[in-house]
Image: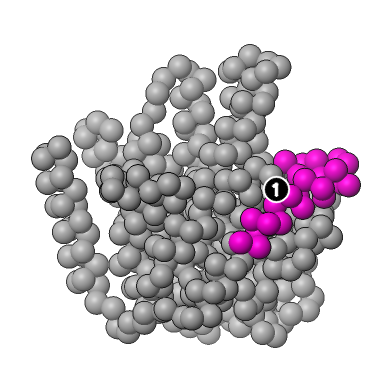
Amino acid sequence: MNSKLLVFLLIILSFRFYYFYRNQPQLMDGQMLSFEAAILSQPQAVNSQQIIVANYQNQSFGGLRIRIATGRFPEFSYGDFVRISGSISSKNGRVLMYFPKIEAINNSSNILQSSLKNINILRQKLIILFSKTLPSPSSSLLLGIIFGIKEQMPKDFSDNLRTSGVFHVIAASGMNVTLIGGFISTFFAFFVKRQIAIGLSILGILFYAVLAGLEPSIIRASIMGILVFSAQIMGRQTLAINGLTLAGFGMLFIDPMLLSDVGFQLSFAATLGLILIPKIRAIGRIWVIGNDINTTIAAQVATLPILLANFGTYSIYSILVNGLVLWTVPILMMIGGIGAVLGLILEPFGQLLIYLSFPLLLYFETIVNFFGEIGGIMALKNFPWQFTVGYYCLLISVLLIFKRGK
């Protein structure tokens, strides 16, 4: 990207951040708050509670992300519109609400509410389809890999995914968007003009992003995918770094609060690492898992300080486990994705296709459970921010030296 354009974007973003935080609503600890919001990510069930994330918008051009803890019943779902009333608690820069009054809002004339409700119905149909076809945790693993749907995941298997360092595979991200967009454009290219096929792939990416849940990683990946496919329609080639820069700029301009979102930080840094960090040729020659290990090393080198600063833990087996299982992900996505579409039309045929993924899922689960049970978590406390700054300065210096030498 042209350096002048980059500086111009940074200046615009600086003004956006200034006005956003200047107009930020000043909320006091214990202050009563009442607002309406749409639930744009599936609530998490933790013991006897539901954890909901909602956006509070003020009249000025800004807002706050509020984390809400409430009872398990009534259950709320992705796409629900709710009215929330209660007192807030502000801790370490985070705004929290404990057991506020939450009322569901039903407005059939609201197009957005109706659309999200229909999307949630489709999500539930997919969950039922996969649960009827595969045993647990295979069904939840495949749902996570394809759609990022994690609500059916057993806790012990979810813990093993974290311990072995492959929890990221059940979060919809750039790989999902690339495969979805590429498959749609390739399929429809046989029937319509290439530009129309690419346009349909863009619509498919938008639908997939809403279906998977509007998490920062999938939004960032979708914006990048749409930019790339749009460039193909116009007959221009777009570099990945340009797409990532524009995606990050667009997301932060719309919602500056994403800068403090760990999911956004990890997805952006990991993608940047995949683009900029060179592959190790000796590893790349290893059959089947070579590219996966290279991918894992690049992503983890780019995100290590973020992981340690926010979670204080790191899986020492992560690179090995990723190399052993990541090669199955594109295959599982292709088989499961086509099976899901077919299953919504002709359920028996869709179930048959989905069941073909069972051997690979068993292999995936065996690797994850083995390394998850033997542990391998490295824990750190009080991670210094100075290390993060120094780490990235050193990493940038090494990359610049490598580039000059090459």
Q: What stretch is highlighted in magenta?
A: 338-363
Q: Which residue is drawn at 37% across and 72% down?
A: 316
Give the residue furthest to the top.
Answer: 193
Q: Name the residue under label 1.
A: 336
Q: Is mark 1 on a helix, strand or loop?
A: helix
**Horizontal and vertical percent for residue 92?**
40, 79
Q: Which quadrant of the view contains residue 179?
A: top right
Please indicate whether residue 116 sits to the left or right of residue 318 in the image. Answer: right
**Horizontal and vertical percent for residue 45?**
67, 76
Q: Is residue 273 visible?
A: no
Q: Which quadrant of the view contains residue 203?
A: top right
Task: Tell me the amino acid under the disc marked 1.
Answer: Gly
In magenta segment, residue 355:
yes
Q: Is residue 260 above or below residue 157?
A: above
Please indicate whether residue 155 sits to the left or right of residue 392 in the image. Answer: right
In magenta segment, residue 53:
no
Q: Which residue is drawn at 85% across and 43% down?
A: 349
